[in-house]
Image (spheres, rainbow, N blue to C red):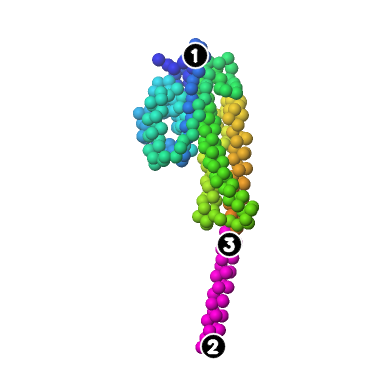
Amino acid sequence: MAHPGFLDARAMPTLPIPSTTAPQAERLRVRAVYLEGQIDLKAFRVRNAEFPVLAADPLIFEPVRGSFLVVRKFGALVFWNCPEALQRSILADARKLMGDSQAERMEDSLDVLVGAPENAVTFNEVRLKELSLDRLSIISQAFAQSVALDYIEREVAAALKRFEPVVSDIHHTGKLRLSVRQVLKAVGFSLQVRSMVLANLTLFDKPPETWESEMLERVDSQLYDFFDLEERLSAINQKVAYFTDMSSIFMNLLSDRRSVQLELAILLLILIEVVVFTWSLFR
């Protein structure tokens, strides 16, 4: 039996979503999960060849009739109306594909009301007249990006918290007590976060579907506001910029420290030569 509320997307006529009209509004529970790292979409598709594929970019499956899975390469999976046992199985397989990473995952849930009088994004849910593939794709992308930003926000906050005592120590003592390795890790972290945001999440790119439909563009803009994507991304960029500046200062302090150590070593060698020369004169 066709799942109520799901209509064939006109922009993608070859995709086999059942075409029915929802007799009444239905509330769907959508769950987004972010796993640290990237997902090889081609390998994921091969490992789950038994799932019908509705779209290749983004990768959308229909694991069971009326349930949908959207997989994003930056490590996010979005489950629509999927049984919990199936979700656990898919997540376990995804973790194996990503190298059995034991990193904590981030997740969130969202209510989508299908069969509403009009398309709207309210303070606690998304309302749609009908759910087509392009709308599913747009909602999933914004939701996946939001969960990925949750992870980045947590990591940036934790990194800044770790370095608060260091900054305070420099303020009070005028000395840097970090090792070269610790400073390099700080620099590497800031570069990693920038790469993750700019290269993987593509938060500045509009989904291609929005260029063909004013309604979809409006829904996408409402989702941006709903998840505060632009404001959160701006806050992350500011924190990473501060973190990068701090790392640069640490590198300069390390360079100065090594220069002083080198100068002291040279002075010590000169002193030793003077002592040896003086001792040889009075032999």
Amino acid type, residue under disc 3 in the picture: Arg
Which disc number belongs to residue 217? none
Q: Residue at label 2?
A: 282
Amino acid type, residue under disc 1 in the picture: Ala
Amino acid type, residue under disc 2 in the picture: Phe
Which disc number belongs to residue 22? 1
Task: Name which of mark 1 and mark 2 comes first in the sequence.
Answer: 1
Residue shown at 44% from the left, 40% from the top: 103
Which disc number belongs to residue 257? 3
From the viewer's perspective, is residue 23 above or below residue 83? Answer: above
Q: Compute the Cα span from label 1 to label 2.
A: 107 Å
Looking at the image, residue 92 sits to the left or right of residue 272; the answer is left
Residue shown at 54% from the left, 31% from the top: 142
From the viewer's perspective, is residue 220 above or below residue 6? Answer: below
Q: Residues within 10 Å of mark 3 (few under 14, many from 20)?
A: some
Where residue 185 appears, x then y in whole percent? 51, 51
Decide whether residue 271 is among the magenta residues: yes
Where residue 136 appears, x then y in whole percent? 50, 25
Please, what secondary structure does the residue beneath circle 2 have? Answer: loop
Please, what secondary structure does the residue beneath circle 3 have? Answer: helix
Residue shown at 38% from the left, 26% from the top: 85
**Residues drawn in magenta:** 254-283
Q: Main secondary structure of the magenta part?
A: helix
Looking at the image, residue 96 sits to the left or right of residue 178; the answer is left
Foreground mark, 3 or 2? 2
Task: Name which of mark 3 and mark 2 comes first in the sequence.
Answer: 3
Quarter occupied by the N terminus: top left
Would you say residue 280 is visible in this rendering?
yes
